[in-house]
Amino acid sequence: MDSWVSPGPNKPIGPNEVEAAIDDETLASLSMQTGLSRDELISRITRDLPEAINKLTPNGELPPAGSEDVTLLDQVPPRAAP
């Protein structure tokens, strides 16, 4: 994760690391909220998280507390009606 915040290339994250970091209940909840399967959700987190963190920390620092103009979920499509 340090490589995502620091300048330079972002190290990748593996699906097993996502599953180890996010509990099953949270993954199930996110899957229901987004309409994505568990596998697709993990795949997207694996692909997009390093770059999202990199963009949120352009100077190697976290955004100021209370900053409302930044969110990791901006590009998650709304869940389609069943």
Image (cartoon, grey):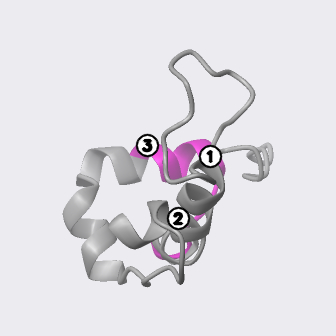
> Which contiguous range is marked in magenta?
29-40
Residue nearer the viewer, 80 or 10: 10
Label 3 crowding class (10 Å Cα cut-off): few <14, some 14-19, many 20+? few
Q: Which of marks 3 and 2 is in front?
A: 2
In the image, residue 4 above or below residue 39: above
Mark nearer the N terminus (3 vs 2): 3
Q: Label 3: which residue?
A: 29
What numbered label is drawn on residue 12? none
Kindly check if marks 2 and 1 are in contact, taking CB atoms under 8 A apart as contact: yes
Kindly check if marks 3 and 2 are in contact, taking CB atoms under 8 A apart as contact: no
Q: Where is residue 38 in the image (x, y as percent from the top left)?
A: 45, 67
Q: Residue at horizontal 72%, vertical 52%?
A: 76
Q: Which amino acid does label 3 sit on?
A: Ser
Label 2 crowding class (10 Å Cα cut-off): few <14, some 14-19, many 20+? some
Q: Which amino acid does label 2 sit on?
A: Leu
What numbered label is drawn on residue 49? 2
For the residues marked 3 and 2, what is the alpha-carbon distance in whole angstroms? 18 Å
> Horizontally, is 59 left or right of 23 in the view?
right
